[in-house]
Every structure is written in structure tokens, then in C-alpha cells.
Amino acid sequence: MITVSPDTFPLAQVFTISRGSKAEARVLTVRVTRGGVTGWGECVPYPRYGDTLERVVAQISALPEGITREAVQTALPALAGAADIPLAGEPAAGLPGDVLRLRPDLVVAEAKLRAAHARIGASLAEYWPKISLMGLVGQQTNALASFASGSATVLQGAAGLRWRLFDFGRVDAEVAIARGRQREALAAWRGAVLAAGAQVEGGFVELAARRQAYAAAGQQAGDLARAYVRAKVAFQAGEISRDDLRMAELAMQDGEDAAVTARLALARAKTISFLTRRAPRAVWRMLSLN
């Protein structure tokens, strides 16, 4: 008899690494009882590698009661599946619009647009006169004793006026140039937003599709592994031929290959989704290699 029970053990202190912190350990305990003897083992499924407590419990519970040691050895690789390929964390939290605001190319394009808009205001300011005021306070005396007296204080003031009254044609041209550059910056910003939106949306769609494909491939690999275990038990009982057993083994291996391929595609999709937020140029280089 095979029984699986989840247990939770609080840690003496919080365990922290670069990927996060944990204050408890969630462990699965497997007990096998046969011939009056019970043996047990423990394991800790790691979500980083696509494992969960529920998934491992379902996989172990699917093993037949009379499974042999040799059959378990052949079933274990299928249970592990493609877990050797690490997956990145979730690349984007929040709405796609929030992801777009974090992209450096859009930050730069928006800054250029604001600068171009500010240059229009600076050009329009040339239509108005500019008044400058100056003041001077000093001390002037022939005698050192009266240096700090009020009679030695000198006050001077001046005012200046500058107005490009007869240069409005040049000012008009400067304003037109500033507005033209602002329109160019606006067009560049819109183009950057469209391109970034296409990349981010494509990354989200690709990630969702790859996640579904990986879940389906993992389920299929588990089904084929269980089918192979049942086929091996049937072969040992003389119910099927060796050719049938070989076909079941080939099908299990094909399922494992499909799970590995699906996990690799999911890892690539997560990487691309992360890069669309941080390094869009790297995304295009990465896509051009495929």
C-alpha cells in the first residue's frame, strides 16, 4: 500500500535567498507498506521547477499498488518530466500598460517629446520684450573714518529692454521649426508605443499559450508514464506481448520529449516577456535567431 501525506514544518528562522523568503517547509511523506514492513521517504516539491504538492501527490497516487522496484525506477523519470529546465519567475505583474511604462525606449521617447514641447514655449517667448533690472550698492569716501557712514553709501540702478521687434520673421521661423520638431517627436513616440505594445502583447499571448501547452504536455507525459507502468505489470502477468510493452515505452519516451520541449518553449517565452519590459533590443536580436 502506498500513502502520501503533506506536512508543514515551521522553520526556526526565516530562510532567505535571492528568489525570496520562506518561514516554513512543506514536505510530502510517502509510506509504502508491504509484507508487514513499512518504509517511508520525504520530498519537497519546488515551484521554481514547475512542481506543486498537489501535482506530486497526484503522480504518486496514480502508481499501482503492486508496482515493483524496477517499475518504479522506470516511472520516476517520467514523474520528474522536464523539471531539469529552470523557469524564470513571472515577468510582468499588473496590466500591460504598466509594463509599457517601464520600458526604457518609451521613457526616452516621452522625454524627447516633452523637451520638444518645451522648446515651442521657449520660441514663443521671443515675441515678448524682455526687461532686465540691475542694482549696485557700494561705499565711496575719501576719509576712512566716514567709510561706514550713510553719506558714503552709493546706490545705483539700471533697467534694460530687449525686444526683437524688427526680427519677428526669424522668430516665426524658429517657432515653426520648434513645432515641426515637436511633431516629429510625437510621431516617434507614437511609433515607439505601437511597437512596444505589439511586443508586450505578443509576449503575453505567447506566454499564455506556452503555459497551456506545457500543462497539457505534462499531463500527457504523466498519463503515458502511468500507461507504461500498467503495461509492464500486464506484461509480467502475461497479458500483453513484448511488442506491446515496447510500444508503450516508446509512447512514454515521446511524451517525455514533448514535455521537455514544451518546458523549453515556456522558459523562452518567459525570458522574452521579461526582456520586452527591460531590454527591447535584445528581444529583437533573440527573435531574429529563431
Image (cartoon, rainbow, N blue to C red):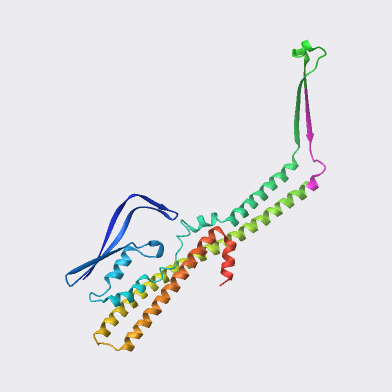
State which quadrant residue 229 falls in: bottom left
For the C terminus, give its image quadrant.
Answer: bottom right
Q: Where residue 183 appears, x then y in whole percent?
A: 67, 55
Give above or below for 145 relative to 257: above
Give above or below for 100 relative to 235: above
Q: Is residue 197 left or right of residue 43?
A: right
Q: Is residue 201 left or right of residue 11?
A: right
Task: State how many labels appear.
Answer: 0
Start and end of the magenta stretch? Answer: 156-170
Q: Where residue 275 appears, x then y in whole percent?
A: 54, 61
Q: Is residue 41 left or right of residue 211?
A: left
Q: Where residue 163 appears, x then y in whole percent?
A: 79, 38
Q: Where residue 187 appears, x then y in whole percent?
A: 65, 58
Foreground residue among 167 and 281 = 281
Q: Is residue 157 magenta?
A: yes
For the N terminus, give its image quadrant.
Answer: bottom left
Q: Residue at x 77, y 20 (%)?
A: 138
Q: Is residue 200 left or right of residue 1?
A: right
Please identify the residue farthest to the left as the structure is shown: 36
Give above or below for 148 relative to 280: above
Foreground residue among 174 and 113 = 113
Q: Residue at x 80, y 47 (%)?
A: 170
Q: Is residue 63 magenta?
A: no
